[in-house]
Image (cartoon, coloured by chain):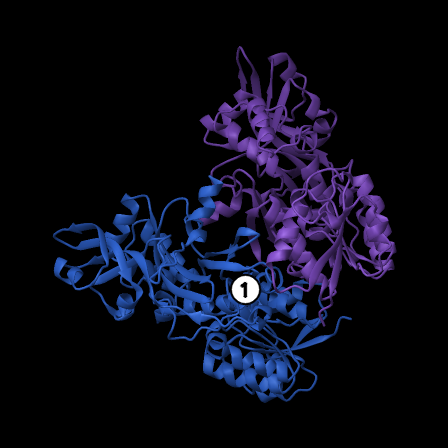
Chain colours: A blue, B purple
Amino acid sequence: MKKQLTIGLFGFGCVGTGLYEVLNRTTLLQASIKHIVIKDLSKKRIIDPGYFSTDADRILNDKEINVVVELINDYEAAYAIVTRALKAGKHVVSANKKLIAYYLDELVSLAKENNVSFLYEASVGGSIPIIRNLEEYYNNDSLSNISGIVNGTTNYILTKTGEGESFDEALKNAQELGFAELDPTSDVDGFDAKYKLVLLLKHAFGFTAKQDELWNYGIRQLKDWDATYAREKGLKIKLLAYGTRINNQVIGFVAPHLIPANHFAFNVENEFNAVVVEALFSDKQLFLGKGAGSHPTASAVLSDISALQFDYAYEYKKSKTEEALAFESDYSVKVYLSATSQEKLDQVRFIETLETYSGPSHSYKIGIIPYEEIRKQDWNNEPDYFLAIIPDSVELTKGIEFKETESAGLIEELS
Amino acid sequence: MKKQLTIGLFGFGCVGTGLYEVLNRTTLLQASIKHIVIKDLSKKRIIDPGYFSTDADRILNDKEINVVVELINDYEAAYAIVTRALKAGKHVVSANKKLIAYYLDELVSLAKENNVSFLYEASVGGSIPIIRNLEEYYNNDSLSNISGIVNGTTNYILTKTGEGESFDEALKNAQELGFAELDPTSDVDGFDAKYKLVLLLKHAFGFTAKQDELWNYGIRQLKDWDATYAREKGLKIKLLAYGTRINNQVIGFVAPHLIPANHFAFNVENEFNAVVVEALFSDKQLFLGKGAGSHPTASAVLSDISALQFDYAYEYKKSKTEEALAFESDYSVKVYLSATSQEKLDQVRFIETLETYSGPSHSYKIGIIPYEEIRKQDWNNEPDYFLAIIPDSVELTKGIEFKETESAGLIEELS
């Protein structure tokens, strides 16, 4: 039943190196790396240089290699590799959330046409087996909500800003420690979390979201006064990917949330990730683990490789149901919005104002705002503002009310 | 690929009723209940009486029924039903942890011989998909520790004693609310948690523990002064099932633990369950969800039924490795031990005493005690004592030291 897996590996960075080590130390798997394709042959490597080349054909044209593991950063280059590998009848394991978010349906079709598997557990939540659980365990239990902390870099930065560092200091320290890229845009502006949300929405609801439908707003514009406000109120600011489904409508976005101590994400700090799944019958469930790092991520890749021994493939069962789901943007949400001046603050239209503060350095408002009003601006690049969602506040305009219950209810019930 | 599942159900209590409702409200599954066998026909039921009989043969001799769902309390009666069903070539889904803990290897062999599946996700942790994750996701990632809150009844009682109720009051209230049985022995003396620990050890380490090897000590002897001690120190008392593996040695027990605020179990209250898995590469992961209740448990049963559509069976991969594991009892542990008098306290041999208190109502000691010393007494029936393990303190006598790292490290790293 088990087959011998011969692996061609693209990329030998942090996760690739981890995979090599993890594979070497596990005894239960009949899998070995035959060849590794990298960009730069001159870099010193920890293993036999005979493994390496810069020639993709060495893997893609090798009939003995039946599994391609793709661990490179460039998503367009990854697209070329993955499509060629699938067409060549090789299984593909990838951790490239951007690639998958952009080309999900195409890659899924291609894998199916060529009767191979395309697996990507490591692309969301590092070691947390969230895709597999959504795919296998919840397939008969109607899911209503999925949300979580899915970006370790911003969670590390927010842990530090929560402790009093400024955003710029925290980012600089994260970069020095290797937790953040030199160009941190993808992480701090919420793009990375959005790619992951695309995958979560697909496996939770069977819904393929378009990149431009999902609003992503990150933490780049977080000011000291926002961190201070949260701290004084006993709250924390966390970047959450949020998805909910009501009837045939799907709402999804990535945004900072201002959360209370009973929120599931409150104690999820540093590089930890956590995802809460809310289902009709099984109720709320929390999955928590290391969202990044060489070995945790490599272990998720390894788990996919291991599943290939038994010809495992995602079935996308939820995508096959009759119901046509539609993306919904006609809703309102409660927010905290701070601005560098009262004048700036007044330029944003609220449906309802609940609290206002005006002061010499900044002003803020808490109130209800329509999502369409939010979408009008490129908030990631608006240095005069910082906005955070207040949980339990998403409300459809057309009368049906529902709540971000998974966000606030869990720990409340626990405590 | 999907097959039609025709279900024969034994038992129509809380979980059985939940299953009926859940099955009725899900659309993704080709499964229906054909017949239900119960003990008492005179009880009023919420559904068509035509479903019911007291005659097991109506299910076991019905060739059309290909799945038996066993949801009765009596584990010996369940044994008779399950063995007959497996021999008749029917898949079996069970939530009966006592049955499985007692007859695991036999039932697994029987299922294999008859080429059918025997699934029991609902038997541990209610809705938490812990068996499936241990079985499928961690199979190549060496597991070192598994521990958790796996009994909702005692967790509910401990939540209340933590708030100031006496054990007797809390138990009485739990009974009135239907959270505890009239004879609460199985829950409050840690038997139920021990059965679940047997299943966790099997799926985590591939180790079949004998009932009498695993020490189970519950919370029946918890005194007000113990609860007060915990509260004053900012600690909580939680009943944990604990399993660890070092090299070829396995340690497992169920006992109250005196845990600090950074312990994973600290905020897991009321009927919630939580399991922490620690693995070599994926690090620590927490699974948290409702451990009991009609719908959460039924959803786990349903997930097993759903898996049967694709001929899913546990493979017990970890049991197939060459290594012979042995149960280890030669270790010491740090404990808090209270007694109704100094004299009583002095009767228990400690290797090392770290703190002592002697007072008019009671005395206590914190120190290191050999497991063999603990095993000598039937602590559940020693009203003069209460004992709680202090995390991070399990230490092999033969020199190799290790720690209950999963217990204390997780939230510490988080915060």
Q: Is residue A288 visible?
A: no
| Screen quadrant of the N terminus of chain A | bottom right
Residue B362 location (% of width, % of height): 56, 15
> Can residue A389 be spotted in the picture?
yes
The structure residue drawn at horizontal position 59% and vertical position 64%, both measured from the top left corner, is A132
What kind of residue is marked 1? Thr
Q: Crowding near pointer 1: few (<14 within 10 Å), some, many (20+)? A: many
Chain letter of mark 1 equals A
Residue identified by numbered label 1: A297
User: Could you tell whether A22 is left or right of A249 in the image?
Assistant: right
Using residue A326 as the reference point, say whether residue B280 is left or right of it: right
The relative height of residue B40 versus residue A311 in the rendered view (above or below) is: above
For image coordinates 65% across by 42% down, the residue present is B14
The image shows residue B22, relative to residue A62, as above or below, that is above
What percent of the width, then of the height, locates residue B183?
Answer: 69, 28
Q: Is residue B389 above or below residue A80?
A: above
Q: Position of residue A120 (x, y in %)?
A: 56, 70
Place of residue B147 in the rendered image (x, y in percent of width and height, measured from the top left): 62, 44
Q: Quadrant of residue B75?
A: top right
Relative to B239, is A306 above or below?
below
User: In screen coordinates, is B194 left or right of A407?
Assistant: right
Q: Is residue A270 left or right of residue B43?
A: left
User: In the image as oriented, which residue stretches furthest toward the top?
Assistant: B360
Q: What kind of element bears circle 1? A: helix
- Observer-nearest of A228 and B6: B6
Task: Count the labels in the image.
Answer: 1
Residue under the point 83% across and 56% down: B111
